Image (cartoon, rainbow, N blue to C red):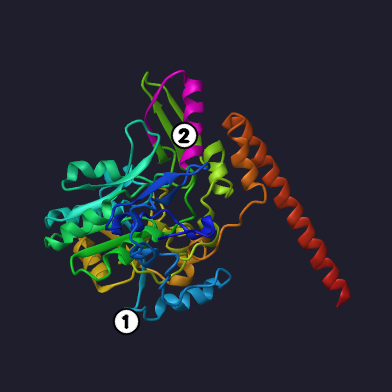
Amino acid sequence: MIELKSKKECCGCSACVNICPQKCIIMKEDEEGFIYPAVNAKTCIECNLCRQVCPILNSHASRQMNPHTSVISAARENHEQNASGFCPSTYAAYCLDQEIRQMSSSGGIFFTVAEQVLKTGGIVFGVRLAEDCRSAYHISVENKNELSLLLGSKYMQSNPGNCFSEARRYLEEGRRVLFVGAPCQIEGLKKFLKKDYPYLLCMDFICHGVPSPKTWRKYLKYRERQANDSACAVQFRNKNFGWQKYQLSIQFENGGCYRKEHAEDLYMKLFLNNISMRPSCYSCSFRKINRVSDLTIADFWGIGRTVPEMDDDKGTSLIVVHSAKGKDLLEAIRDQIRLKEVDAKRAFSENPSVKKQPVKPLLRGRYFTTIDRLPIETAGARYLILSEWKKKLRKIKKSIILSKKKKGT
């Protein structure tokens, strides 16, 4: 039976739910809005399969990076062979179809890869936003028209449900499967499958962390009160005013729209300041260069300094190829994308989430307690201010210590 000593030991991937032969495990939401396994002890047969597939309890990541490893070391690791004997490569890329690129969070690479898999009769698993815009979950799609449901970032934790089991069923039938998810979800899927399927393709992304669905529900309700209407569509990465300064956009039934740059929006600030993230995200086991996925995608921040000719503020993707399958897939879409191989050190230099753990705010726990008592706009603003003051105090303390050290020498 899976028993968590700490919530840091669970990333919510649902591998344990999918593997249980007795179906005695369900994922339940806690007081912060994150899902964790709950076991029915009466029907559990103590087979321990749930523990065996947990990606955190059984981390088998090869050459796992220390969170304090330098970018230079990370770049060196990227150019060495990974556990499967493949030497990873790093690229800047974007889709040549400008409509697809505009609808995507960065360069439109996911859509192009997914479309290629569908053309070969494959299945694509990815994350969609619920119709009421209040949650996100994994689904599978089999035709191009449904791919639009999976486009764009969803800044809340998704629920994979039974998609691991569904993916295995398609693989056993000999169908090609592309599974897209957070690094922890891909590790969970691989542990669940227990073997490498030749028709399986996995794509993850460089992840800052996953924010609380509860925080999102409260925030969306606040915006609906402000608009006096129900939300009908959400874009977490609207690029109408550029990729670099993307905006959170909420459309309402009456035609109204809320739109705010991410650096100014309350929900995004809570996330980017690490206040609303899952406990396991602060010590993530999967924040590394070499991964079990075939492809890793991300925003290519700093593209203007690395490959200036590919910087038009419409979105450029960073791609890391981890396997021969990933390389073959990239070759298959080469005529649909602009692609340039880049130096790993430069590619990762302005994307710290590839290796750096987010700092857990001291007031995080108090924040989650407060949002049950106060409106999210009040509680959120209060803890953002307090968080900023804590950061300033840490900087002052650090500069004083450095100053004393210099005087001492």
Q: Which residue is mark 1?
A: 85
Q: Nearer the viewer, residue 35 or 364?
A: 35
> Image quarter for residue 1?
bottom left
> Image quarter for residue 146?
top left
As measured in the structure, the alpha-carbon distance from the residue carrying label 2 to the one carrying label 1 is 44 Å
Which residue is drawn at the image coordinates 51% and 22% (left, top)? 226
Q: Which residue is mark 2?
A: 217
Q: Which residues are magenta?
A: 213-234
Residue 196 lies, with reference to residue 122, above or below; the image says below
Which amino acid lies under the numbered mark 2 shown in the image of this protein?
A: Arg
On residue 293, which mark appears? none
Q: Earlier in the sequence, mark 2 or mark 1?
A: 1
Which residue is drawn at the image coordinates 29% and 52% (left, top)? 23
Counting from the top left corner in percent of width and height, residue 28 is at 42, 45
Q: Is residue 265 visible?
A: no
Which amino acid lies under the numbered mark 1 shown in the image of this protein?
A: Gly
| Quadrant, the C terminus | bottom right
What secondary structure is found at the residue carrying circle 1? loop
